[in-house]
Amino acid sequence: MEKKISVVIPTYRRPQLLMECIAALARQDLKRDDFEVIVVSDGPDSITKKMVVSWKHTGLLDIRYIPLPVKKGPAAARNAGWRAAVGQIIAFTDDDTMPDKGWLCNIWESYASQPYVAFTGRVMVPAPEKPTDYEWNTAQLEKAEFITANCACTRLALEKTGGFDERFEIAWREDSDLEFKLLQHNIPIIHLQHALVVHPVRKADWGVSLKEQRKSMFNALLYKKYPQLYRRKIQQQPPWNYYVMVLALAAVIAGLLLHAAWLTITAFMVWLVLLTAFIKKRLTYTTHAWPHVMEMVVTSMLIPFLSVYWTLYGAFRYRVLFL
């Protein structure tokens, strides 16, 4: 039976978060028979399967469970979902979101039977007045132009663009990649202010910003595919401060080995000035609680090295001149 909308949710071993997302979808204003929910597990997950089956038995949702045979990443999971969907429109969200009850109605009412069209809605990130660095970074999702936590495309638009590039193996830049493909194919992207999805901030471990630097390698892939769009919409220029900080510490070591006091002192001062500016920037809009300040100091010393490493690794991996 054809549906108006198919909702695709990629997930992997986060049943509690997924449960809240599905519960929000069960409260949609759109009639139950007008949409389906497809949960795609990024690899087999028996707990998630049982949970989805239990929802199906309630009769509150038309819901399906699709497992990938092996873990391939959210891009691959979304592709499997939309290719199995029967809806005229494919809506995407994440397993850690809570769509507003009017989310699907707003998307459907904005659809005028155009064969090629995409929609992007509003994301709201509840955060404290003085957030942590991780909470503040997550809150920047509210400013994103196109994000898989809240977007939708017609099936024809996805078929024309090829959907998601599965080389983006983690949740990073695969949404911008789809946005850029839509733009290159002259497929309109309509912004829906009232199609709202709430994206709570998950609890993060100490030093989470260090783990986040691995994502930098996928910047190289996006740049390789769309260099002009990348520089215009993502990053206007390389993070030169990171490169200078890395080179400055290398110069400090060289100065010590060569017994060149002037080189050691000069290079150390350059590094210290840039480090202080980096820490100050990260604390501008975030909490000044002592444990958080210490975390910012320590991680700010390490982030430039990790970021440069993963950026250059990505440039090597994807064979592109990228900084």
Image (cartoon, rainbow, N blue to C red):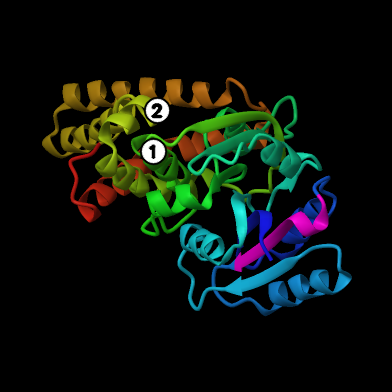
The magenta stretch spans residue 177: no
Q: Which residue is mark 2?
A: 233
Find residue 87 and report its horizontal and vertical position in percent.
63, 57
Q: CA distance from mark 2 to mark 1?
A: 10 Å
Residue 41 picture quarter: bottom right
Q: Residue at x 56, y 67 (%)?
A: 84
Q: Which residue is mark 1?
A: 180
- Badge nearest the viewer, 2 or 1: 1
Disc 1 secondary structure class = helix
Residue nearest the viewer, comparing 180 with 162: 162
Which quarter of the figure is the N terminus placed in?
A: bottom right
Q: Which residues are magenta?
A: 31-40
Find residue 54 and report its horizontal and vertical position in percent.
82, 74
Residue nearest the viewer, comparing 263 with 14: 14
Disc 2 secondary structure class = helix
Q: Residue at x 50, y 33 (%)?
A: 189
Q: Residue at x 65, y 56 (%)?
A: 6
Residue nearest the viewer, comparing 255 with 319: 319
Residue 171 visible in this rendered orientation of the protein:
yes
Q: Residue at x 64, y 68 (%)?
A: 13
